[in-house]
Amino acid sequence: MKKIFSAFLLLSFALFFSQETKPMFWQDIQNFKKLDQEQVPPKDAILLEGSSSFTKWTDVASYFPDKTIINRGFGGSRLTDLNDFANDLLDPYQPKQIIIYCGENDFADNHQLKANEVVKRYKTFYKKIREKFPNIQVDYISMKYSPSRKELWSQMKEANKKIAAFMKKEPNAAFIDITKVMEDANGNVRKDLFVEDMLHMTPEGYKLWTKVMNPYMK
């Protein structure tokens, strides 16, 4: 019985260690690959990269009917994840423009994170984009004020400011500030633009984003 139990343990350990541990969001990337296999991604499209504010914008094409959009947002992603999967997120495509919304989850993942670290992560991803696409338009949408993450807003606001300054100096680049359009007449964020979790947006919120984004869209 002892020998059988020992053999079982050895087999269990062998099976455990033989299985490769998949990184977080690995399945999301596989889903993107499957989509690209089923339908060849169009050239000269506008490529959206980032987190759940893009993921949940499932009908984004209807907001920009005269544009060709490829949405590759994956919910919960951080700038570290965009960097980790940069090749998978960039190599299959030949866009004329890339628009990024990411950074909120970096702060949510670590409340002690400094703005400079998030800016550094963004610059790393931006550099990866430029290595592949030196001349296309690249835009960054400012991190929004999410009522459920109000305690992190000071860090996000500082990161927004520094990323804006960086993008201003870059050619074919822009910082798209959506914070003001989401405020009421008193300068407070409109909570009616959010669904129950006070993090993700309603269609009205996306309509306001569209209004701000339109002038930047190629």
Image (spheres, rainbow, N blue to C red):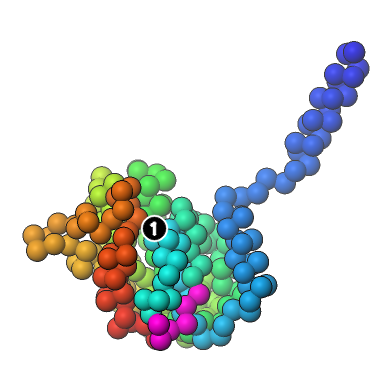
Quarter the C terminus occupies: bottom left
- Provide residue 130's location: percent of width, then percent of height: 50, 77
Q: Quadrant of the N terminus?
A: top right
Query: Residue 7, how many percent across, how many down?
Result: 88, 24
Residue segment shown in magenta: 65-70
* Position of 191 relative to 41 (above/below): above
> Residue at left 56%, top 72%?
90
Does residue 129 appear left or right of residue 180 in this picture? right
Residue 164 falls in image quadrant: bottom left
Dominant secondary-structure state across the stretch colored magenta: loop
* SS state under label 1: loop
Q: Quadrant of residue 54?
A: bottom left
Residue drawn 36% across and 76% down? 63
Q: How many marks?
A: 1
Q: Amino acid at mark 1?
A: Gly
Q: Closer to the camera, 40 or 94?
A: 40
User: What residue is at 67 percent from the left and 72 percent from the top?
Assistant: 37
Q: Is residue 170 visible?
A: no
Q: Nearer the viewer, residue 165 or 87?
A: 87
Along the viewing direction, whichever of 125 and 137 lies nearer the viewer:
137
Identify the residue under disc 1. Answer: 103
Residues 159 and 145: in front is 145
Percent across and percent down for residue 149 are: 29, 47
The part of the image, by quadrant, that contains residue 139 is: bottom left
Q: Residue at x 26, y 70 (%)?
A: 208
Classify 43 as above or below 160: below
